[in-house]
Image: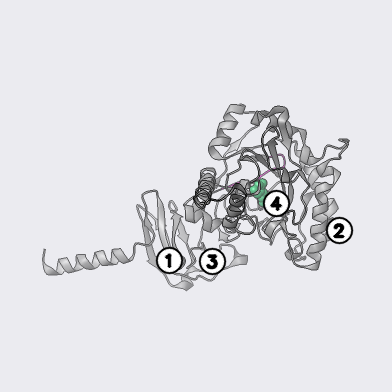
Amino acid sequence: MNFKTILSLALLSLVQATSTIGKRQDDGSCSVRGEQGCTQLPCCRGLVCQINSANQHLQTQPTHRNVLLSKTKIERSSRCRTTDYEASSFAWPFTAPTIAGVTLRVNDGPLSPCEAALLRVSYPSEPLDVLRDRYNRDGYVFLKGLLPREDVLSAREAYFTSLAPSGMLKPGTAKVDGIFDTEASAADFPGIGAGSDKSARPGSTDKSAIFTEMALKAHTEPWYAGTEDGEVTGFARHPALYDFIARFSGWGESTLAVRRSLLRNNTPGNKAVGVHYDQTFMRYGEPTAVTAWVPMGDIRIEGGGLIYLEGGEALGQEIEEDFTAKAKAAGMSDAEMRNAFNANMMSTGFLCDGPAEFGRKYGKRWLVSAYEAGDVVLHRPHTIHASTINDDPEARIRLGTDLRFVNSARQWDTRWSNHYFFNDGV
Ligand SMILES: O=C(O)CCC(=O)C(=O)O
Ligand SMILES: [Fe+2]
């Protein structure tokens, strides 16, 4: 080898050493170095991922046209390559839609195609053992058509009938459709439970105070909560759901539907629920509660439905164990430990507000779906989930409720025995 060859080989290795961003790792993810440090990014099979300098994927929708902040392009071939481009060449529409031809947005931006996949579908008619195995393995079981569609739609209609005086619905539309009046300000119709500290009343406008009062009242109306004398059962106590959970959990008559629940309006233009697992909010009980997430109406894939982190149950457990080990090492009592757990989270109890950043950090995809009235997803106490921003093309308001079930023969978090009210501290 002559001197010239040695010099060019040395230069080549120097170039490679300084351009290792986007290099494929053994587990198939890319290591990406941005201004905020090194983040794991799942590589896209045959697709182009684009990130800005904060490692966020570029927006893809015309209404959210973005100015590019960085010049990095990552492609997947046998290994990831990086190339520099002029900022101007990155204007919309470069990024491929997330899934099924649409772009899904979360609180911290859009998800790229390599960051999402579909939820696994199950049917209530499948053997219970199969469904339980799936629930334990995946951390969730997505049951198509568990509830009669017409019951779900009547509950939806009742909700929007009582909320209509708030001015949230588009004039001339049917209540059951729950179409948001896009002439109105989204800030006046903030999402219940979408990230207010210690369950504080969300919103800051005068109109939002009126809306949230009405939205709160819906939680105790007979159509939803039933009546104490049992004359009216109420949607939250739907026997088809209760009976299924009693059999599925094996708790039988000890199965208790806890009273506290949140009727969540995910209105177009608002923030969605951040990344969390439910045990954070049920810390005074054993980690055995079952959450039933019940979409109240049809939800398009981009309509603001719940999303689950793939393999997120094991990660939730790891996070919990990590907290426990640290708290024990610090010699904390059980009560101190509970407070410390929540001190590790955000003040809302969320692990993080932004699902995109969270998924990239752990190199995991978000599992997404469209939902139909009658579907129910059951999830475990440590299953990590969040929701997407509601970008429904018709501005359909995403309504859902999360109903929780415990084994009353065991220790459970009795703070959940009251109806939800603002600042209830749970
Ligand atoms: O409906 C939502 O956006 C959040 C629901 C949730 O976190 C749950 O069901 O546990
Ligand atoms: Fe949750």
Determine which residue is flagged by label 3.
92
Tell me the SS state at disc 2.
Answer: helix
Disc 2 and disc 3 in contact, CB within 8 angstroms: no
Give the CA separation, mark 4 to mark 3.
42 Å
> Toward the viewer: 49 or 187?
187
Q: Is 330 covered by the magenta stretch?
A: no
Give the CA separation, mark 2 to mark 3.
39 Å
> Local crowd at mark 4 within 10 Å, few (<14), some, or many (≥20)?
some
> Local crowd at mark 1 within 10 Å, few (<14), some, or many (≥20)?
many
Which circle's residue, 2 or 4, is located before the other in the chain? Answer: 2
Which circle's residue, 4 or 1, is located before the other in the chain? Answer: 1
Determine which residue is flagged by label 4.
426
Which circle's residue, 4 or 3, is located before the other in the chain? Answer: 3
Tell me the SS state at disc 3.
Answer: loop
Span shown in magenta: 367-375
Determine which residue is flagged by label 1.
72
Q: Residue at left 41%, top 56%? A: 30
Give the label on residue 165, or none.
2
